[in-house]
Image: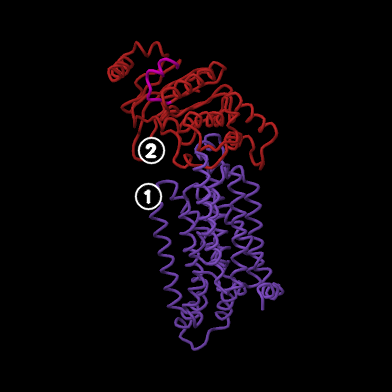
Amino acid sequence: MSNMEKLRFYFDFPFVRYAFIVGILIALCSSLLGVTLVLKRFSFIGDGLSHVAFGAMSLSATLPVMIKKYALAWSGDEKLSPRMQSVVNWFGNLNDMYIVLPVTLICAVLLLRTGQNTKIKGDAAVAMLSVSALAIGYLLMNRYPSRANISGDVCSTLFGSTSIITLKQEDVRLCIIMSIVVLLTFILFYNKIFAVTFDENFIKAAGVKANAYNLLIAVITALIIVLAMNLVGSLLISALIIFPALSAMRVFKSFRAVIICSAVISVLCAAFGIIASILYSTPVGSTIVAADLAVFILFSIVSAVTGRVRK
Amino acid sequence: MVCKNASLGYEDGIVAENLDFTIKKGDYLCILGENGSGKSTLIKAILGLKSQVSGTIEWCGDVKKNEVGYLPQQTVVQKDFPASVREIVRSGCLAKCGLRPFYSKEEKELAENTMKQLEIDKLAKRCYRDLSGGQQQRVLLARALCATRKMLLLDEPVTGLDPKAQTDLYELIAKLNREGITIIMVSHDIVSAVKYASHILHIGGRKQLFFGTTEDYAKSAAGKLFIGTEMIENE
């Protein structure tokens, strides 16, 4: 089968097409906010939050098992009461997002709070939170295994689904809705986000509620991270957020140009990564990140060369 | 603006006590003081970013709280910020927008006119991080002027500029003051303060050492001491 035929074969499935759209949307959202996060010196927060999301993901995966176990031990019966059974089923059927999203949101708000007061404390807080979330997540997964293949589960949460085809229909729908929310918020608050990023004190003095916009940024960051977990997994999310922004900043000189360029880079890399992962059956997440890295190196060379020419 | 008996400080102690001064429309007030004398805290209080421990800061006349154009000290973030001059100057209009997502035609025009006034209109498309220190300060000044035409608060605006750029900036500020804009400037530079300002507020050792016109300051004890040491240092 030639590459073209292989692609056509895959894209005949509706879920592959959906996954492609989701990938592109996630890449677009993360690159838009990435510029702000990098410039505000908040790139590390993306990293910390993604580990928190991992912890929350393991919690939500193990919750039904945990409840079942303790309910049995507490009642001393062989079987669960019908009521308990329905609770366990409810948690089992619950989409992971409904647990991961609120936990990540809360942590995002807390982290941005501490980050404002003192720099070093903020740094330490992020490091502490992210490693504890990782450790507890892994601990939970081992202690209360919900499926037989623990290391497979862990691996796919950390590095993303080995293949986009494992995305569930509901994930896709949720992703599309959330990406649209993020995009709209970003466009509507573009000028405010720029001002908050460039100079918080100035706009505070002018009577603009800068803290409210900081909170907004924290909330969208959390949203994006939860979204991107499906695509690239929690270890590689920061790459999706940081790389396009850094590449664009090498070459472009105005905020709008940087944003547009980083969006274009991110979308192209995501598209390329997904197609390559289908053709060569590589993991989606790492393929996309590798593409982002390649673009970053290319842009660094371009900026070094043009910089020298200008001087 | 009237500041009555205001004491400023943080939870763990008072930084400056019993500050008592009045600023009238068209004044050029220079706030002097050593590092740690509470200048920055006073700025925050004037801007309404921080409330005073006791006493009052009153706004009367046509300048209201949050109608102060602020020229902050540069932060690390700004030094390599990829933004064009036009984008930065326009962001001064943000407070006028309220919840409206984009700038109106008038606000864009205001930004263009302000850039012309400060002679940076040719730099409009240039990147902020590629400008010289003096040009960067002009950009930030233009942004502050977009926010308000009544009162400007400048926090050590000449720090890090070469002597020529310092003089240019002082002259520019004096020109704006002659056009009727009230100026409050925080500075270390006593010589220029005495040269340009109409009033001086000198704080040090946790209290107000002097407030009054510049002529009186030169005669006062605090002034003589401060100017005297400054002269000796300069020699």
Q: Which mark is residue A44?
A: none
Please give the range of residues in magenta.
Answer: B186-196
Quarter occupied by the C terminus of chain B: top left
Pointer 2 indicates a residue of which chain? Answer: B
Left or right: residue B174 versus residue A167 is left
Q: Image quadrant of residue A254? A: top right
- The overriding secondary structure of the stretch rendered in magenta is helix
Q: Which residue is mark 1?
A: A120
User: Which color is chain A depicted in?
Assistant: purple
**A245, B52: nearer the viewer:** A245
Q: Residues within 10 Å of mark 2 (few under 14, many from 20)?
A: few
Q: How many marks?
A: 2
> Does the magenta portion include B194?
yes
A43 versus B101 height, above or below: below
**A287, A104: nearer the viewer:** A287
User: Which color is chain B depicted in?
Assistant: red
> Does the magenta portion include B88?
no
Q: Which residue is mark 2?
A: B10
